[in-house]
Amino acid sequence: MAESYPEDLKYHPEHDWARIEGDEAAFGITWYAQDALGEVVFYDPPEVGATVSKDQAYTEVESVKAVSDVFAPLSGEITAVNDKLSDSPELINSDPYGDGWLVRVKLSDTDELESLLDVGAYKDLLSS
Amino acid sequence: MPAAADTLRQSPLRDRHEAAGAKLVPFAGWEMPVQYQGVRAEHLNVRAKAGMFDVSHMGEVRTSGPQAEELLQHLLSNDVSKLAEDGAQYSVLCNEEGGVLDDLFTYRLADGSFLTVTNAANHERDHDWMAGHAEGFDATVEDVAARYAMLAVQGPVARGAVECIADGVLPKRMRTATIPVAGEDTLVCGTGYTGEDGVELLMPPAHAPAVWDALLAQGVRPAGLGARDTLRLEACFHLYGNDLSLDRNPIEAGLGWICKLDTGFIGSEALQDVEPEQTLVPFVFTGPGIPRQGNPVNTPAGGGEVTSGTLSPCLETGAGLAYVPKGAAEPGTEIEVDVRGKPRAAVISERPLYAKQPARPAAHDPHSPPKNKES
């Protein structure tokens, strides 16, 4: 897909996004992140129930060449993981904001939202 | 030490890479294409058809003079006296302790004239080592890396594509010939590092774009250093800095076959009595995961270490090379690789992990069914 950054998402400077839905959020990696990584060939989802902490690595995505840590944009507890990615990790490349989502998280501190970037600020970061 | 982007050396094919959509990355002081459309697609294209790799970052050292052969016999692990004119030979360069300084291909271009191809990261050290040991030999060691661009054209139809743009007969495997390619004299070598048939082309840098364009027109597709790494790993070829280093000797690396100890090369004395506890073996994962360099290995005979690991595009599973205790080196031995804390099941394999497919019968093969004539 072509480079894009949806307006309705919040962004973390480590190239992760969060789609906020009440006190839950879906997480994934941005178009920029998947492009830098190249073809994702392996993804081993974390456990449902695991705790994630803002700015900490909570899972990994792997290309043929390299492993990349994925950072949590917000803190909370994982309520669902995208099982489809075990068989089709390439969805992270082809649809990073849709079918390529990584986890759903029950947020533990919605105040953290304030520290995330909106699309304009994230694009500024990319062009700086 | 990583060099700043503005000091990275550029291949003469830089603009061709950009036109082909390459992702350029710093590599051993050069900015080189790691991939174009994707590592897997490029890898599979080389296995099925033909790909071309810009390996202009690799260095060249010329050794010439009446005692050039004697000097190289003193430096290189293989028996250089067995290297025929227009022949190619694989060897390692060792220090006195038997540690590996580099692994190299050497070509005998003429009587008393040899060309040795070095790994980019080791080129200066290799040249200085070779020149530094030339005293007492009637031979000259020259760094000629700036005189050559290098293209590896590999795959089952690679030779056919090169033949179409060459004026002369291509050399057989492990032989060389200087013939016009795309209109200018080129050193064509029947070598490569992918496990496929093909050739490597050494030419003046200014001529490289013309050769690239001519090969593109023949349907040869660009392949990056990412695919070169996965291809060589499936073929179980060593990569310096991963599987070979100063801390490993060629015997434990499985390169005893290119170490002719009776030639007296530097390091041969240290290697006489080496009885390594570990040996380098290929392995494949039997479940999920991708092994990576540095992952610890657990075997029934003790611990080991992964030196190269990837997802094999042909086997579609994690695969790699690891040093393991000799008692666990038999193919079929079940091992466990610790991938960042996750134990992954694996089994020691036969080498190579992927073998070149037998050539398909040509159209004129008498055993193939007759074609219908339509005219």
Image: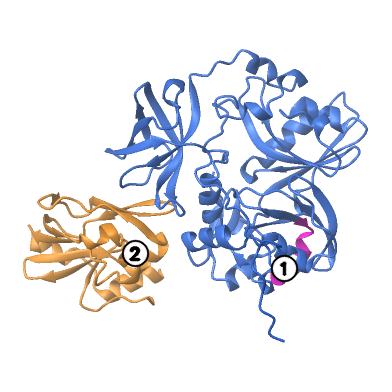
Q: Residues within 10 Å of mark 1 (few under 14, many from 20)?
A: some
* Same chain? Circles 2 and 1: no
Instruction: Name the residue tied to disc 1.
Output: B209
Q: Identify the element where label 1 is drawn.
A: helix
Q: Which residues are magenta?
A: B202-214
Residue B298 location, x and y as percent? 34, 28
- Determine if residue B160 is in view: yes
Chain designation of label 1? B
Q: Which chain is blue?
A: B
Tell me what residue is drawn at x 31 percent, y 61 percent: A89
- Does the magenta portion include B276? no
Quadrant in which the N terminus of chain A appears: bottom left
Residue A28 location, x and y as percent? 24, 64
Q: Identify the element where label 2 is drawn.
A: loop
Quadrant in which the C terminus of chain A appears: bottom left
Instruction: Name the residue tied to disc 2.
Output: A90
Please tell me the colour of chain A.
orange
Q: Is residue B366 left or right of residue B193?
A: right
Q: Amino acid at mark 1?
A: Pro
Q: Residue furthest right?
A: B66
Give A10 or A84, whichever is nearer the viewer.
A84
Disc 2 versus disc 1: distance between alpha carbons?
Answer: 34 Å
